[in-house]
Image (cartoon, grey):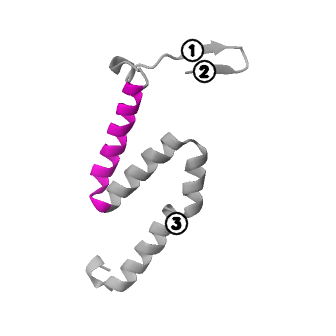
Amino acid sequence: MFINHIHLASLAAVLLVVGFNLAHPRHFIKVYRHGKGQFLFFTVTLVLTIVEDLLIGIAAGIVLKLIFHLIRGVKPRQFLSPKVDVTDFGEFIVIKF
């Protein structure tokens, strides 16, 4: 069966249900509990994805996060090589960022 044989109203209904499940109001509350900064990144990415395009929304979220890190004092070379401390206790390993 080809995609052009599906009625547009049926396809729209399926996309609406999937979109609602992905952006359920409960998810907004959960993201807000992680912090206002995370909520800002989430909403900017979501709105730009809906208004513009998926690639533009994700790129805007990444750029906003990079700007946020620069404001907080993270050096650009630390973006790709974070400081990681690994401690081996025999039975388990502790990783600290």
Mark linked to residue 95: 2
Element assignment for label 2: strand
Picture coordinates of residue 92, whole percent (x, y): 70, 21
- Vertical side of 48 occupied by 81: above or below: above
Q: Main secondary structure of the magenta part?
A: helix
Assess whether residue 69 is covered by the magenta stretch: yes
Image quarter hosting the C terminus:
top right
- Residue at point 54% right, 56% down? 28
Q: On residue 85, which mark appears?
A: 1
Residue 71 spot, x, y in % from top left: 39, 26
Of 50 and 32, which appears nearest the observer?
32
Real-space Cα separation, disc 1 to disc 2, in angstroms: 6 Å
| Total labels drawn | 3
Dot 2 or dot 3, earlier in sequence? 3
The magenta region covers: 51-71
For discs 2 and 3, the disc positioned in front in the rendered view: 3
Residue drawn at (34%, 47%), measured in percent from left and top? Answer: 58
Q: Amino acid at mark 1?
A: Asp
